[in-house]
Amino acid sequence: DKPVYILGIESSCDDTSAAVICDAKVLSNVVANQEVHSKYGGVVPELASRAHQQNIVPVVQQALSQANITKEQLSAIAFTKGPGLMGSLLVGTSFAKSLALGLQIPLIDVNHMQAHILAHFIDDEKSKKPTFPFICLTISGGHTQIVKVSDYFKMEILGETIDDAVGEAFDKSAKILGLPYPGGPLIDKYAQLGNEKAFQFTKPKVGDLEFSFSGLKTGILYFIQKQQRINPKFIEENLNDICASIQYTIAEILMDKLKKAVKLTGIKQIAIAGGVSANSEIRNRLQLAEKHFGWTTFVPKFEYTTDNAAMIAVTGYLKYLDHTYAAISVSAKARLKV
Ligand code: KG4
Ligand code: ZN
């Protein structure tokens, strides 16, 4: 059989990414982060679309050249159809359509949330692959879901957040602490030097597999405001301990829910996916669960946690094998379920 080369394009939020894979092996995975948002404390949609527009051609060119292939060698083009910011999605969608049309090759639409999960099927000798069925905790800037994965494209949400996503909990907490966007990775960094038991935050009370993070955020805000009134240097003097305590609370919440999911489904194969699965505490906790609870756990390689086009390409590859192509009239969708 001839090798299959897929170009993946991701532009759902604030990262412009292109990747080339050969079968399920990643040849290149280029990600252009958008600096413009950091000073606003969050992604500004209008600026994101404009930056995608500027980045998309050079990023695709770089992905092709790093993979050492020409666009004429491509078998198909996979792109993120949604969910995400409409203006951002439109850039990748239009570009993918035009290129597929120009090259006369199949176009494949990809669900971003499925792709985060299917990143586990990237062919990489060092990482083991889950078998079906498994449970995936998808944690990102926009979503927090416990998904039962029965097959590549047979996924069922068992529970999700009723308000903020866990990435937002990290980013909004970071903002309260005066850290730039996205604050998740910074909380992770400072937490490594802090005492996780220094401060206690209340965990939310919600249904079995549901999540809620808006109360936690408010709790953190009031606590910090109160402490700052007593000592205006409170944040400065306790940053590491505050970050460690926030991260500990979030990891506790996630692990509690995973334990419930195992109890309810009897499935002990547990994966994590999405930007927040880059978090070192969450990764450690999951690894420990192998020993403590007898779970088999799957933690994605660091570069496939936050938004990237390799996960879009590998999802495209799985659809390509089934000849599941998109019509050229396909359109981006801001809201899309797994
Ligand atoms: O999956 P992703 O790149 O984009 C979305 O689809 O939302 O996730 C981005 C989120 C942001 O909220 C970011 O702060 C968070 O992932 N994140 C982290 C870490 N790395 C990224 N949160 C905690 N610890 C990290 N190390
Ligand atoms: Zn994402």
Image (spheres, grey):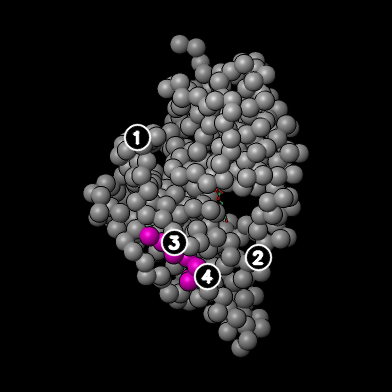
Disc 1 target residue? 151
Give how far across and how far down residue 165 sits, in percent. 50, 58
Which-is-in-front pick, marks 3 and 4? 3
- Mark 4 Cα within 10 Å, few/some/many (few <14, many 20+)? many
Q: Nearer the viewer, residue 220 or 213?
A: 213
Closer to the chain start, of discs 4 and 2, is: 2
Identify which residue is drawn at 50% across, 24% down. 325
Range drawn in magenta = 210-217
Q: Is mark 4 within 8 Å of ligand 1?
A: no
Q: Quadrant of the C terminus?
A: top left
Q: Counting residues from the N terminus, which is met first, the one under dot 2 or under dot 3?
A: 3
Q: Which residue is mark 3?
A: 162
For label 4, the residue is 217
Nearest to N terminus: mark 2 or mark 1: 1
User: Contact (CB < 8 A) between labels 4 and 1?
Assistant: no
Indicate the amino acid at tag 3: Ile
Q: Does the beta carbon of the residue at mark 3 sit less than 8 Å from ligand 1?
A: no
